[in-house]
Image (cartoon, coloured by chain):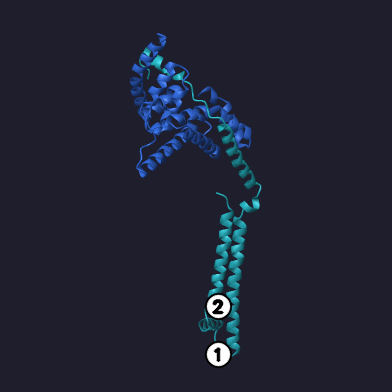
Amino acid sequence: MIRDTSDEQLVAALRDLDEPEIPAGLEQRILREVDALQTARDQTAAAPARVRMTQPRRTAAAVAGFAGLGTVFGAYCYRALSQIESGAIEFAMPLALRFLAASVDMVLLGPVALVLVAGIGCYLFGLAGEQAVPE
Amino acid sequence: MTPDDVGEIPALVERTLAGDRNAFGRIVRQYERRLYGLACLMTRDHAGAEDIVQEAFVRAYRKLDRFDRTREFYPWLATIATRLCQNWLAARARIARREGAELPAEIAAAGANEPAAALASSELGEKLRAAIAALPYGERLAVWLVYRQEMRVADAARVLGVTDGTVKTWLFRARRKLRPQFARADAFEENGE
């Protein structure tokens, strides 16, 4: 790479150049930043409940989902039984058909609302979990 | 490997990863001046170089677990700083374009007012530093990394994101440009004028 004597002298002179002095306080600024970063890491590590939100979030979503579905199913059963009692549906019909008839007959707004509430509940639980997970 | 990187730095990296805050402080002290010199040369701006050095160390700390401990530390750190400098320069150029203004003189023009130039300890050093500052970007950085900071050509190429051949070409061109100025300055100093 270095071809002749003048090049060697040049390179030697370049090697001897001073590096600029670092500004006062720069090292302290760097170490403060690093310290703050490490403190934040330590705090995150010391807060497992907040960090490990994935499992509780899933559990909460499952509970909310089952509660919602259970409520909807309960409403169907209640409605079907009351219609059977009132004689609107033939008792001789197979059970599945009776539930189907009750479903068609009943106002769907109630179950739909319940499903929506359950869905929103799951979403909010999920959202809270996402926010708690650090980058 | 440079003497700095034999033994001590990998051990300091290990200790930092294990949570020893003082170990990273020693890494900072070991490299801050070299890194600041590089950032000054790239940005030609004291405040910009200072911010870049700080951010480079913080990023290095964040990503320390990804550092390949079989390699030298300084080229890795210099690569981070170089990318930050490039972003900084691009941002400055964008601002200048958007506002229809020229880049500030200290950034647009190379010369004796360049921050690093003021730090030369001798007449020869001052002239040489001014001559380096006047070199085009790639040549300037190649000279500084390979000759002043004694980085291997392959490492310098990685830092600058070019091939080894390009670095060698830059070095060749830089030497060709610097040689006459060095000869004049050397003669000037020898004559004691």
Given the image, on which type of amino acid does mark 1 rest?
Ala
Given the image, on which type of amino acid does mark 2 rest?
Gly
* Towards the viewer: A25 or B2: A25
* Mark 2 surroundings within 10 Å by alpha-carbon count, few (fewer than 14), some (14 through 19), many (20 or more): few
Query: Which residue is pictured at 48% across the width and 21% down the height?
Result: A18
Q: Quadrant of residue A54?
A: bottom right
Query: Which residue is pictured at 49% across the width and 36% down the height?
Result: B52
Q: Which residue is mark 2?
A: A110
Element type where label 2 sits in the image: helix
User: Is residue B163 rendered to the left or right of residue B46?
Assistant: left
Q: How far separated are the C-alphas under marks 2 and 1?
A: 20 Å
Element type where label 1 sits in the image: loop
Q: Which residue is mark 1?
A: A88
Q: Quadrant of residue B190?
A: top left
User: CB of mark 2 within 8 Å of CB of mark 1?
Assistant: no
Q: Is residue A58 above or below residue A35?
A: below
User: Is residue A55 rendered to the left or right of residue B122?
Assistant: right
Residue A6 visible in rendering: yes
- Pick whichever of labels 2 and 1 is earlier in the sequence: 1
